[in-house]
């Protein structure tokens, strides 16, 4: 049987290369696209799954829902909660703070930068990472201990045998010497410890000074817990509201607590480690979240590509069934049983599927590196997965594509077939099935094309959308890491004097801000007190010229107005300061217009804040997040410095790289201990936009594959319809039909399922894209143009696909067509 | 005179072989004639009929149909000529499987851009005439061979053509159905239609007014039957 099947397939390939070629190529492309996209989906789903006990590890997130503001969840949680969590929840085995940091090691006058984590000694009991020397329990016990990755050890010492060696770390100008106590072996699988090169204990001094260790309202990084049992997460979740009420409450003037009723505005939630990668897509202050719907959609596109390819094979096989009718009739006449013929045709389908599977794997090997470079992820072909998945796919595709044609073919009655002058067309039911398959294929393809268009337009829109400041010619430095006002002033003057700089500003927020402070401000409106949590930024002279925000009402800060400037030390209480709000803040307090807010006074503690201006919203964060209500205060750097200023400059007449180098050089004259890196604002914001763009590219890849496979199907169908309708066209021409009339007829027939597909695809795409766009704070409208372009594109491609066959049929000589077997 | 063929020649050329299907055919047919063409297989009967029906082009000679010199017309003009002046009946019926009997018959009128109401009237009359009105909504595969051929005749006459061409119209039918088809063709001829029929049946050829015998691509005998 195997040799019969092989011979039959080889003969078909020789006699009907178009048929076999379309079958193999279409199916291979479908299998290749499926395997490729599944690699990405598996990669995204594998985040944080490789830790042993991953099921018992959770992160504690904060959720703020201040009146007048959009509630938000933050991955950063106050470390103040950690000891209380351990006391109040017996289900917790370990609890640690985990802070991301950039570690600068000073070597021979220059800095080497490493990605690091600062944490507690319990870290290795929660994340049991393998070390070259098995002393994980003690690796971080001493304040000067340090664990390196292999790459960091090689980079620093030229060997991975680094235990006991010392490293001098320069953090924000403060030097400390550490002894290497462990070297990590490779961390398997992607996750929150991806790319970590150094792990070191949090310095005691930091724990004593930094507000996120001391106050409930302050957070700077993540809190991770390891539970005793996987199911304990339910008990933890149930207990967190009472925990907040019990532990975070305090008096109205108590700075450590969150006031008398913290549970009204603040909540904690427990997020399983395995869910973080997707959960973080909707959370502020998270590192690298990915929208699960997008990942699932990419997987769905892969599955649909495979289904399209299977549908193609069914379509081509049923279309061709009539042409094999005489072969079946003759075989039956010679004694073949129906079961033997069924087995033969199934065998042929499986063999074609097997060949396509092998080619598909090769396609996957070509596409995966392309996809890896498009997404920037370390995705490789997982041969372990392919080894078990490919046989299933081959059998599945073979059976799916072979069973219906095999049943049809093996069921032909030999007497009827041999007596007939024409080959059977399979009847109207077969025609309907073929049209339904084409409609199904194009529905999927058109839907993906429309989605791709919308995603592309949205990502373009985000790139060009008004962010409330001018990005062009804007270079942003890094935090100065000093509160020394003298040094800040000198830095300001030094950078301003750099040739090419047209303006300079200090601010406490910058594109992709390093830290954010939110504080409650009250406004006594005629209808009662309104309280809103505002994001605070303190800015210097030159900010307007550097960032160029739009003033919507009132005026900008002016050094000549004494009340504009920050108060002198000791003057902060019982004084009035001038502030500027953004539009969101104006709305949060219920002012009907920016102009209405001017002159109104806000309160925080005993200080009054008079609103002198309103600016448009400035977006320094993700386009998915709502711009928070913001308040700007002003400092002339005369008597009150910044907490941690970030310099930014506008420049002119100098190439960007030259300007950056000049600024870096100027920076080093005052802060030689802190590496300097002035970068364009766009570059800082890149991570917020690149993910969607890369995934947009994947959608494009999927759309092209889907459309191509659908066109292969249509082309195959057109080719076989041309053969089947050759005789009919002869009749029509004999009756006086002209070539244009024949073309119209054929194109109309071919396009009918395509147009039906468009009708199905449009509402589906609309629903999908409406949901996707709703995730963005700023988004495009679902313009009908995207749908029209998608439909027109599909129709044009479909027409071009069938045009060759159509023209050939339209030009046929009627006498020759009538002689042909119909 | 309705048809005048002068020195009609039809050669088929392949890479190595040149076959003469028709050679120096001269033929005149008057309006209202019923001509039967006979001859052995491969003698060129069907080729001659195809050329008369303008679905094949001669490689030499001229073909005059009434006021038209058909060898000079292009493809589009020939299509227009066919739909306005010719009707066809084939041995294998050549009905379109995907269309109902009514739609098959209507097809010839659709290509004339005839208004729908008029088409419907004419189709109904044609179906009544050949006795298949009760099968109007059926598909060809649901009809017997005789019924299919009567439907094909209805399609041929629905446009009231000046010439009906029939290529072995009884070839696929049993005796009874064959006789019915010949009755219909005779009736049409009696009403004034010009008919040219290729047949292998001497008895059916005898029902025509003139008989032409062909051999090796040439007309060897042309005789008028005694009526």
Image (spheres, coloured by chain):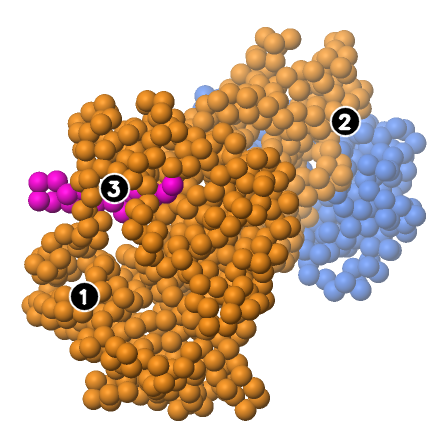
| Secondary element type, mark 3 | strand
The magenta span reads A102-120
| Residue A217 placement (x, y as % from top left) | 45, 63
Residue situated in front as seen by the camera: A759 or A282:
A282
Q: Is residue A780 above or below residue A281?
A: below
Q: Pointer 3: residues within 10 angstroms few (<14), some, or many (20+)? A: some
Which numbered dot is residue A484?
Answer: 1
Chain name for mark 3:
A
- The residue to which callout 3 is attached is A114
**According to the image, label 2 marks what residue?**
A420
| Residue A111 horizontal side relative to residue A440, left or right | left
Q: Chain of mark 1?
A: A
> Magenta includes A606?
no
* Horizontal side of residue A475 vs A745, given as left or right: left
Colour orange maps to chain: A
Crowdedness of circle 2 by 10 Å Cα count: few (<14), some, many (20+)? few
Q: Which mark is residue A160?
A: none
**Mark whose residue sits in front, 1 or 2:** 1
* Residue visible at 76% across and 33% down in the picture: B91
- As rendered, which of A810 and A48 lies closer to the eye? A48
- Residue placed at 77% from the left, 63% from the top? B116
Q: Is A546 placed left or right of A359 in the picture?
A: left
CB under 8 Å between discs 1 and 3: no
Quadrant of the rendering where the N terminus of chain A is positioned: top right
- For the residues marked 1 and 3, what is the alpha-carbon distance in whole angstroms? 27 Å
Q: Residue at 25% of width from left, 77% of height from top? A: A569
How much space separates mark 1 and mark 2, taking CA atoms?
99 Å
């Amino acid at each position: 049987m195997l040799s019969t099947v092989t011979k039959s397939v080889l003969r078909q390939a020789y006699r009907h290369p178009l048929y076999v070629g379309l079958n193999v190529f279409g199916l291979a492309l479908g299998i290749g696209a499926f395997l490729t996209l599944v690699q990405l989906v598996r990669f995204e789903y594998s985040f944080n799954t490789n830790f042993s006990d991953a099921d018992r590890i959770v992160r504690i997130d904060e959720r703020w829902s201040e009146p007048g503001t959009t509630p938000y969840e933050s991955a950063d949680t106050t470390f103040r909660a950690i000891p209380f969590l351990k006391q109040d929840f017996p289900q917790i085995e370990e609890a640690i703070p985990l802070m991301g940091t950039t570690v600068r090691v000073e070597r021979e006058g220059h800095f080497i930068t490493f990605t690091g984590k600062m944490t507690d000694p319990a870290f290795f009991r929660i994340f049991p990472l393998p070390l070259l020397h098995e002393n994980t329990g003690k690796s971080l016990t001493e304040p000067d201990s340090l664990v390196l990755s292999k790459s960091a050890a090689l980079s620093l010492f030229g060997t991975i045998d680094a235990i006991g060696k010392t490293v001098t770390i320069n953090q924000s100008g403060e030097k400390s010497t550490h002894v290497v106590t462990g070297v990590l072996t490779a961390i398997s699988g992607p996750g929150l410890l991806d790319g970590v090169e150094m792990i070191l204990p949090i310095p005691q001094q930091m724990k004593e000074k930094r507000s996120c260790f001391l106050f409930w309202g302050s957070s700077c990084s993540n809190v991770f817990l390891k539970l005793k049992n996987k199911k304990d997460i339910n008990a933890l979740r149930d207990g967190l509201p009472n925990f907040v009420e019990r532990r975070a409450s305090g008096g109205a003037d108590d700075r450590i607590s969150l006031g008398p009723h913290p549970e009204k505005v603040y909540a904690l939630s427990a997020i399983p480690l395995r869910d973080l990668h997707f959960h973080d897509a909707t959370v502020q202050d998270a590192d690298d979240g990915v929208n699960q719907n997008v990942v699932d959609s990419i997987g769905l596109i892969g599955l649909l590509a495979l289904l399209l390819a299977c549908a193609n094979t069914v379509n081509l096989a049923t279309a061709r069934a009539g042409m094999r009718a005489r072969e079946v009739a003759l075989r039956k006449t010679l004694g073949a049983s129906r079961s033997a013929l069924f087995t033969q045709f199934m065998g042929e389908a499986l063999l074609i599927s097997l060949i396509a599977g092998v080619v598909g794997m090769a396609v996957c090997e070509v596409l995966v590196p392309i996809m890896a470079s498009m997404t920037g992820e370390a995705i490789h072909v997982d041969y372990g997965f392919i080894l078990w998945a490919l046989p299933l796919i081959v059998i599945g595709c073979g059976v799916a594509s072979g069973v219906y044609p095999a049943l049809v073919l093996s069921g032909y009655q030999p007497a009827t077939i041999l007596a007939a002058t024409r080959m059977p067309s399979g009847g109207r039911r077969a025609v309907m099935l073929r049209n339904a398959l084409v409609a199904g294929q194009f529905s999927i393809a058109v839907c993906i094309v429309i989605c791709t268009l919308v995603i592309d337009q949205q990502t373009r829109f985000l790139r060009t959308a008004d962010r409330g400041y001018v990005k062009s010619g804007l270079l942003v430095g890094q935090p100065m890491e000093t509160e020394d006002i003298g040094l800040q002033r000198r830095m300001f003057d030094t950078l301003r004097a750099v040739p090419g700089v047209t303006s300079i500003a200090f601010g406490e927020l910058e594109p992709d801000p390093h830290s954010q402070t939110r504080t409650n401000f009250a406004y006594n409106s005629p209808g009662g007190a309104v309280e809103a949590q505002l994001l605070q930024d303190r800015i210097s002279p030159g900010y307007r010229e550097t960032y160029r925000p739009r003033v919507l009402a009132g005026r900008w800060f002016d050094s000549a107005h004494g009340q504009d400037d920050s108060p002198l030390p000791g003057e902060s209480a019982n004084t009035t300061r001038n502030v500027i709000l953004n539009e969101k803040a104006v709305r949060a307090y219920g002012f009907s217009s920016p102009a209405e807010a001017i002159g109104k006074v806000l309160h925080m503690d005993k200080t009054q804040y008079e609103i002198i201006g309103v600016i448009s919203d400035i977006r320094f964060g993700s386009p998915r997040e709502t711009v928070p209500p913001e308040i700007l205060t002003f400092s002339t750097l005369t008597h009150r410095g910044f907490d941690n200023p970030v310099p930014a400059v506008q420049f002119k007449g100098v190439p960007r790289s030259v300007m950056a180098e000049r600024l870096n050089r100027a920076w080093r004259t005052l802060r030689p201990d802190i590496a300097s890196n002035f970068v364009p604002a766009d570059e800082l914001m890149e991570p917020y936009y690149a993910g969607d763009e890369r995934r947009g590219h994947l959608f494009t890849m999927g759309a092209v594959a889907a459309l191509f496979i659908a066109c292969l199907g249509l082309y195959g169908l057109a080719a076989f319809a041309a053969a089947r309708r050759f005789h009919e066209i002869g009749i029509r021409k004999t009756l006086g039909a002209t070539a244009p009339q024949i073309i119209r007829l054929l194109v109309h027939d071919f396009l009918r399922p395509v147009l039906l597909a468009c009708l199905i695809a449009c509402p589906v795409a609309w629903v999908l894209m409406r949901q996707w766009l709703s995730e963005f704070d700023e988004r495009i409208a679902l313009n009908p143009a995207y749908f029209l372009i998608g439909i027109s594109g599909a129709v044009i491609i479909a027409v071009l696909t069938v045009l060759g066959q159509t023209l050939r049929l339209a030009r046929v000589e009627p006498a020759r067509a009538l002689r042909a077997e119909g | 005179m309705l048809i005048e063929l002068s020195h009609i020649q039809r050669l088929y050329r392949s890479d190595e072989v040149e076959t003469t299907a028709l050679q120096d055919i001269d033929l005149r047919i008057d309006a209202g004639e019923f001509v039967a063409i006979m001859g052995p297989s491969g003698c060129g009967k069907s080729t001659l009929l195809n050329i008369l029906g303008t679905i094949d082009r001669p490689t030499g000679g001229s073909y005059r149909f009434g006021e038209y010199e058909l060898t000079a017309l292009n493809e589009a003009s020939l299509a227009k000529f066919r739909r306005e002046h010719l009707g066809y009946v084939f041995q294998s019926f050549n009905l379109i499987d995907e269309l109902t009997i009514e739609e098959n018959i209507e097809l010839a009128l659709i290509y004339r851009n005839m208004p729908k109401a008029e088409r419907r009237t004419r189709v109904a009359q044609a179906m009544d005439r050949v006795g298949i009105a009760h099968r109007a909504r059926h598909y060809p595969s649901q009809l017997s061979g005789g019924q299919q051929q009567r439907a094909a005749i209805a399609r041929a006459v629905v446009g009231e053509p000046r010439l009906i061409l029939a290529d072995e119209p009884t070839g696929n039918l049993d005796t009874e159905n064959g006789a019915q088809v010949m009755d219909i063709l005779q009736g049409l001829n009696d009403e004034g239609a010009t008919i040219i029929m290729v047949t292998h049946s001497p008895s059916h050829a005898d029902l025509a007014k003139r008989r032409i015998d062909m051999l090796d691509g040439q007309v060897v005998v042309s005789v008028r039957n005694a009526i």
